[in-house]
Image (cartoon, coloured by chain):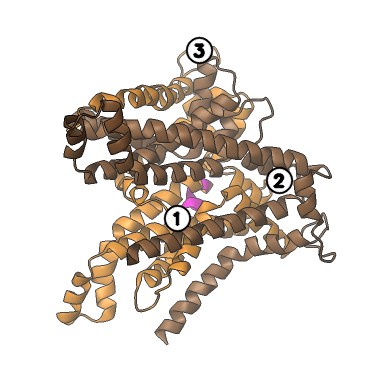
Amino acid sequence: MIKRSYWSLPYLIFMVVFVVLPLLLIVLYAFQDGHGHLTFANITRFFTDSDSLSTFALSIEVAIENTLICILLGYPAAWILSNRKLNRSAVTVMLFIMPMWINALMRTLATAELFSMLGFTLGKGTLLFGMVYDYIPFMIYPIYNTLMKMDNSYAEAAEDLGATPWKVFWKVTVPLSLPGVMSGVLMVFMPTVSTFAISEFLTNNKIKLFGTIIQENINSSMWNYGAALAFIMLFIIGITSLFGENKETQAEGGLI
Amino acid sequence: MKKVLAKAYLYLLLAMLYAPLLFIAVFSFTESRVLGNWTGFSTKLYSNLFTGGMNGGSSLLAAVENTLLIALIAAAISTLLGTVAAVGIFNLKGRKKQTMQFLNNIPMINPDIITGVSLFLLFVFLGFSQGYTTVVLAHVTFCTPYVVLNVLPKLAQMNPNIYEAALDLGATPGQALWKVLVPELRPGMISGFILAFTMSLDDFAVTFFTRGTIGLETLSTYIYADARKGGLTPELRPLMTIIFLIVLILLIVINMRQEKMKKQ
């Protein structure tokens, strides 16, 4: 056996400096005022400021709606793609995954331009549509992956035992594919809450999401309040990641 | 009937997904500065892009160059750091291993904006002046975990005795490393590198927060600034079309190679 456990040391040091320390700094700045004194003012400011609160509520709402639409549209697509009777073409699968490889800002900009050329007013409707465009590949891919890896003998057994195709789907296929749906949700929900450029493009700066107010505060040197908002977001990530599995399974296969 | 419906659904979804990109591609072949205004077929925007004519072209090409260079450097460093780390993590046990894997997961779970803001605060805190170096360091931070995850399975598949065997047969540790370990891990390193490279190309938020004020632009930050100004640089249209085609061809090639390998 190669005795090389100490090879992890450089990476450990790297992560302490570039992952752990920066996250601690968010916490530190969130609980400090401009002069470095300890304070809860930044957090209480968020909970008493109706603008921040309504932006926050809207972000969560848009993220939930986006995630649901992505599941509703994406699940059937992933199911069809994984079904050998309905689809045998690897190229079709690839076409669904390809947008993930193209710069998200580029795709969003193209979408926003198309919307405005078609004469849609940029607002909440276009925001949601555009978000679905952007994120649906990230929902389809993990669901497709779990469906492909699924052992077909379960569904066959259910069929042999007299279940109708509909029952097989709801009682066997769907429950077994839930881990895929869960990682899809992780890949869609948090990025939607935290995005800033995408929402600005799609609404022509009319609608602000949570990511935008973090960005505005940091960029106008209000680091402490910006850090407090980021801290609140970290808190939510902590909660949501408790529900889901980690992303390891997707990354292992490579995204091709 | 069921098959027709299923196919129709897939194609409808694909048409929706690709409509914006096709729209850009079509209007990259006309001169009009306003998008959606067809003023006859022309390849002028393409020549503008490459000769740097008009105002948009040259700064746009510089942004593309920065994007590629940063992605290349960051992916190379990540692959090196991540592979060494994977060997280390693979040989750890118990709580130490869990801790390393947990730390490795953090940058993947964190949204870009958290990674961006936290690194921004780090560089401010340490008094680093922000620019090229900080952007590359930031990209290495969120790319390396993917390399680690791509190399670890290769270590698990590897026969642990062949490295020892090489040493017993008189290879120096260096030779055993280059001739035995690296070839075994190469597929994982390559897919890790590709993943890191594309993650870096795709990034906007992390670059935005760590590039400082020296005027460093990548493709993403260029597009962002452009859209904020209101007028979209027309040369972006041919550029987007070209990128779209390159990605398409690359994926088709990779796909065909995989199919071939499956058949063998």
User: In the displayed structure, does residue B45 sit left or right of residue A229?
Assistant: right
| Residue B235 rendering spot, x and y as whole percentages | 75, 50
Range of magenta residues: A59-63
| Observer-nearest of B86 and B173 | B173
| Residue B8 rendering spot, x and y as whole percentages | 50, 78
Protein chain holding label 3: A
Q: Which mark is residue B227?
A: 2
| Residue A106 rendering spot, x and y as whole percentages | 62, 51
Q: Residue at x 22, y 73 (%)?
A: A155
Secondary structure mainly formed by the magenta segment:
helix
Q: Which mark is residue A36?
A: 3
Q: Which hue is chain B drawn in?
A: brown
Q: Is B173 included in the stretch rendered in magenta?
A: no
Relative to B22, is A23 above or below? Answer: above
Residue type at the position of mark 3: Gly
User: In the displayed structure, does residue A77 sit left or right of residue A249?
Assistant: right
Q: Residue at x 37, y 48 (%)?
A: A251
- Quadrant for the N terminus of chain B, please: bottom left
Are the two marked residues, 2 and 3, in contact with CB atoms closer than 8 angstroms? no
Disc 2 is placed on an element classified as helix
Are the two marked residues, 1 and 3, in contact with CB atoms closer than 8 angstroms? no
Q: Circle 1 sits on which residue? A: A138
Disc 1 is placed on an element classified as helix
Disc 3 is placed on an element classified as loop
Q: Residue at x 41, y 36 (%)?
A: B79
Q: First in sequence: mark 1 or mark 3?
A: 3
In this view, the mark in front (1 or 3) = 1
User: In the displayed structure, does residue B179 sit left or right of residue A45?
Assistant: left
Quick check: can you spot residue B93? yes
Q: Residue furthest bottom?
A: B1
Quick check: can you spot residue A121? no
Q: Which mark is residue A174?
A: none
